[in-house]
Amino acid sequence: MAALPTRHLADLQTSAIGFGAMVLSPGMYGEIDDHRAVAALRTALDEGVTLIDTADGYGADGHNERLVGQALRGRRDQVTIATKFGFRIPEGAPAHRFPVSYTFGELAVNAEPRYVRGYAEQSLRNLGTDVIDLYYPHFPDPEVPLEDTVGAVADLVSEGLVRHLGLSNVTADQLRKAHAVHPVTAVQVQWSMWQPVDPDLHAAARELGVGLVAWGPLGGGFLTGTVQEVAEDDFRRNLPRFEAANLKANYDRYAPLRGIASDLGLTPAQLALAWLLHQDEHVVPIPGSRTPAHIADNLAAARVRLHPDTLARIDEALSRFTPEGTGTLLDH
């Protein structure tokens, strides 16, 4: 296994860049078979990744978690498994709906405490393990106090089924309230060159010593500089920023950043990830890719050092880059 630089999410040490497995289930970025998906995951492990992120709601019937479990056979002790819960609502349980910026308008979750153990036990079976290293409510339930959900996860921690509590897609206030119930190890937050982190949430995480796991660090693939259209079966067609006219405008506006990457001998993806790593020493991006070469390419960003003058040049270019297309939700 190649060694990657490491970082700390509170007291949890992981590789400086993790791997987001969502892209490996069919229907997310178009079709893919399980053989290719498992090969991609094993490439990430071979390249030194020690944080694999999944969720029980990725793919049909826990498909993504099962893929991760298959890829980790014989290597479980090398990896921190992070997974999320709340979207696979049990039969007969109420669906608590909330608005999102997808074109279909809303998602439904149920994070009532009475269901949390069942979610965890199913994920453990899917993953083929006896403990979840980092467990997140996927979204705050609009009808359940987050502190109640967190309390149910805390019970699993005390029983040894979960090692660390995480939060996903929360506000600064929600983080503070949850942290008062049980220490939070990491907050998963959308953060990239085209989606700034919420400054209040960032400040709260720093104050509390909570790590940040950056989902969508490549803007749903846009920041690779290679996406100029999306296929009919690609989930990104639900995102306004990927509508044809908006995507073209965004691609053109992003040209100065691609130019900076070229000047530095980096790929656009490497520049985007290296820039993010320079924003906070306790942020761990979790890009996903299906291609072994792209995975290795992305992970090389963990070793890139950007001069302050370069960072200033990037920030100046970003100040002139306002994406077309409302909405930012790329992952969940």
Image (cartoon, helix red, strand yellow):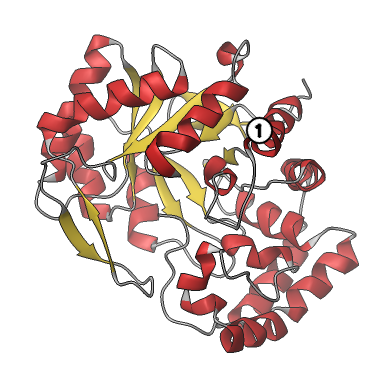
Residue 4 in the image, given as x and y percentages of width and height: 72, 30
Q: Secondary structure at mark 1?
A: helix
User: Residue at 79% across / 43% down in the picture?
Assistant: 300
Can I make out residue 64 in this image? yes
Q: Amino acid at mark 1?
A: Leu
111, above or below 12, in the image: below
As drawn, is 298 to the left or to the right of 141? Answer: right
As drawn, is 94 to the left or to the right of 60? Answer: left
Which quadrant of the view contains residue 29? bottom right
As drawn, is 111 to the left or to the right of 237? Answer: left
Q: Quadrant of the N terminus?
A: top right
Residue 329 in the image, given as x and y percentages of width and height: 42, 64
Q: Foreground: 151 or 263?
A: 151
Q: Residues within 10 Å of mark 1 (few under 14, many from 20)?
A: many
Q: Quadrant of the C terminus?
A: bottom left
Q: Foreground: 241 or 182?
A: 241
110, above or below 158, in the image: below
Can I make out residue 209 in this image? no
Which quadrant of the view contains residue 73? top right
86, above or below 114, in the image: below
Q: Foreground: 105 or 274?
A: 105
Residue position marked by numbered label 1 in the rendering: 41
User: Residue at 61% across / 16% down in the picture?
Assistant: 78
As drawn, is 187 to the left or to the right of 116? Answer: right
The tally of labels here is 1
Residue 163 in the image, given as x and y percentages of width and height: 36, 19
Q: Foreground: 178 or 57?
A: 57
Residue 235 in the image, given as x and y percentages of width and height: 51, 63
